[in-house]
Image: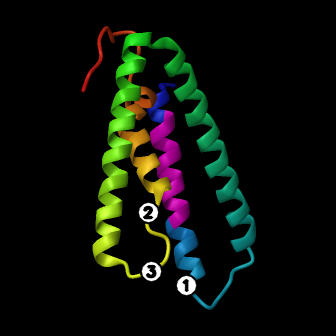
C-alpha cells in the first residue's frame, strides 16, 4: 500500500472520529460505546502521529545537507515572520495576558518548511522545490 493512501485513510478516520465525538459530546444522551470510542480515537491519533513522525524522520535522513540547510533557513525565517506577526496582532487586539503564542508560530513554520517530506516520494527528487 502506498504511504499516501495510508496517510489519507488515517486522516479520514481521524476526521470522522472528531465529528462523532463532537456530536456525542454536545448531546445530553451518552451512549454506552462513547468512552471506548473515545479511547480508540486517542489511540488512533497517537498511532497516526507516531507513523507520520517515523515517515518524516526517514525522509529527513534521505535529503542532502544543502537541501536541509535551505529548509532550516526557511523554517527560521518563517518562524520569525509568524512570531512578529503574532506580536503585532497581539499588540493591537489584546489588552493583557500572554502576548505571543510561540507554539502556533513554531508549528506553522515547521509545517510549511517540512510537510512535503511526508507526502512526497524521494526517488524522483533531485533538487529543492519551493
105, 60: nearer the viewer = 105
The residue sitting at 33% across, 37% down in the picture is 77
Sequence-first disc among 1 and 2: 1
Tell me residue 105's x, y (percent).
41, 51
State the residue position of label 3.
96
Marker disc for residue 122: none
User: Which region of the structure is painted magenta?
Assistant: 6-18
State the residue position of label 1.
26
Q: Are marks 3 and 1 in contact (CB under 8 Å)?
A: no
What's the distance in space between the residues labelled 1 and 2, CA to CA? 31 Å
For this view, does 2 lie left or right of residue 30? left
Tell me residue 99's x, y (percent).
44, 68
The residue sitting at 70% across, 57% down in the picture is 40
State the residue position of label 2.
100
Q: Is residue 15 magenta?
A: yes
- Where residue 110 sits, quadrant-wise, is top left
Amino acid at each position: 500500500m502506498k504511504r499516501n493512501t495510508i496517510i489519507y485513510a488515517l486522516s479520514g478516520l481521524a476526521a470522522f472520529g472528531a465529528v462523532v465525538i463532537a456530536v456525542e459530546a454536545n448531546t445530553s444522551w451518552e451512549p454506552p460505546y462513547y468512552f471506548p470510542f473515545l479511547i480508540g480515537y486517542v489511540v488512533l491519533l497517537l498511532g497516526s502521529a507516531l507513523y507520520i513522525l517515523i515517515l518524516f524522520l526517514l525522509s529527513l535522513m534521505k535529503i542532502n545537507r544543502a537541501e536541509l540547510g535551505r529548509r532550516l533557513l526557511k523554517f527560521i525565517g518563517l518562524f520569525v515572520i509568524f512570531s512578529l506577526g503574532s506580536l503585532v496582532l497581539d499588540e493591537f487586539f489584546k489588552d493583557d495576558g500572554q502576548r505571543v503564542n510561540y507554539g502556533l508560530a513554531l508549528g506553522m513554520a515547521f509545517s510549511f518548511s517540512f510537510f512535503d517530506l511526508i507526502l512526497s516520494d524521494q526517488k524522483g527528487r533531485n533538487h529543492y522545490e519551493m
